[in-house]
Amino acid sequence: MQLRIILDTIFIVSVFIFPWWLSAMFGAALAFRFPKFFELVVGGLLIDLFYGASVAHFTYLFTIGAIGMLLLIEFIRTRLRIFQ
């Protein structure tokens, strides 16, 4: 539990310091490591709120992407023998 809290803090700080693609890869790795890693969605929301990435008046692009990534990773986790 302490490891997850420490890595959550590092992930949230990485959203502010690193480029979006590096934070996304770090978040995906953490989502594989920890089940139900909803902090990935929080990171996507923070990227949307602070950097204002909007494409064709669609504001929450990274949040929707983080939700999709989380659902995909959870689906893959259930299919892998290592995580069962």
Image (cartoon, helix red, strand yellow):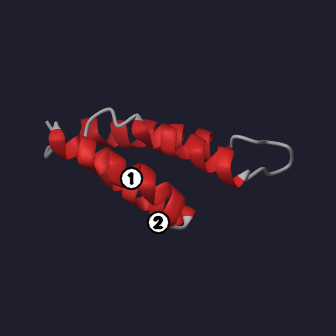
Instruction: Give amino acid for label 1.
Output: Phe
Nearer-the-camera pick, 71 or 21:
21
Which image quadrant for residue 8?
top left
Q: Name the residue: 32% across, 55% down.
A: 29
Measuring from the top left, give residue 72's x and y in whole percent.
43, 41
**Residue neighbourhood size for the residue with mark 2, other residues' Cα within 10 Å, grouped as few (<14), some (14–19), many (≥20):** few
Q: Name the residue: 80% across, 51% down.
A: 55
Disc 1 from disc 2: Cα separation:
10 Å
Mark 1 lies on residue:
11
Mark 1: which secondary structure?
A: helix
Q: Name the residue: 73% across, 53% down.
A: 53
Q: Name the residue: 26% across, 41% down.
A: 5
Reply above or below: 18 against 35.
below
Reply above or below: 13 against 4.
below
The quadrant the N terminus occupies is: top left
Decide which of tag 1 and tag 2 comes sooner along the chain: 1
The quadrant the C terminus occupies is: top left
Residue occupying the far right of the picture: 56
Mark 2 lies on residue:
22
Measuring from the top left, give residue 10's x and y in whole percent.
34, 54
Which image quadrant for residue 40?
top left
Reply above or below: 38 against 27.
above
Nearer-the-camera pick, 1 or 81:
1
